[in-house]
Amino acid sequence: MIGAAGAALTLTFSLGAVARAVPGWDGAIDAAFAILLGGGAVVLARRADDPRTDVATAAWIAAAAEASGLALHASLDGRIAPTAYGILALALAALAVRVGWRGFAQSAAAASLASFAAILAPPVAAAAFAGHATWLVTAAIACGATLAPVAAWRWPRSTLRAAA
């Protein structure tokens, strides 16, 4: 388990150095690392006795989710980042319900927090406070950044209650 978590951390920490080495390709490099880390999680899950409780699989899933968030951050305009992180949270929650491996639900919660934090980031908050964004645009961003994480939070919980 320590080797798998160490490999995930090494890939995650080397991500920034590789992205800085090739300017302009940050989003593509981050997405490639996310795919690589996700593939590693699948390999580990197949070897694990029970992927629903395997810590190494969870570490790789978390690293893949983080790299996915970095790819969104590098590729998208900051004004739509809150909604994009919310959609990432929703996708991770769907995987938590469908696949059930450890790490998906936790990563969905982290993506939900990133969605809320992105609302307060300068591209959204500064534009709203300075009056450069209309209330309709600000409301649409906030709505997308709020509804997707709420759905990501409620969906796995309601599915678990129905199964019990």
Image (tube, rainbow, N blue to C red):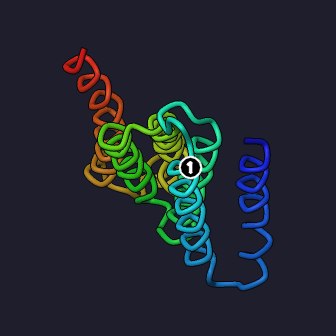
* x and y percentages locating residue 99 in the rendered image: 35, 43
User: Going by the image, does 54 lie left or right of 138?
Assistant: right
- The image shows residue 103 at horizontal and vertical percentages of 52, 39
According to the picture, the residue beneath numbered tag 1 turns out to be 47
Check the image and report above or below for 55 versus 86. above
Q: Quadrant of the N terminus?
A: top right
Q: Position of residue 130 (x, y in %)?
A: 49, 52
Residue type at numbered disc 1:
Arg
Say few, some or many: other residues with alpha carbon within 10 Å of mark 1 (under 14 / 14 to 19 / 20 or more).
Answer: few
Left or right: 9 as drawn, with respect to 114: right
Between 15 and 163, the one lying in front of the other is 163
Is label 1 in a helix, a strand or a loop?
helix
**Quadrant the C terminus occupies:** top left
Q: Residue at x 47, y 55 (%)?
A: 127
Instruction: Residue 156 in the image: state x and y as whole percent.
Output: 31, 30
Q: How many marks?
A: 1
Q: Residue furthest left?
A: 162
**Frontmost residue, 19 versus 58:** 58
Q: Nearer the viewer, residue 117 or 39?
A: 39
Rendered residue at 38%/37% (across/down): 100
Residue at 36 percent across and 46 percent down: it is: 95
Q: Is residue 113 visible?
A: no
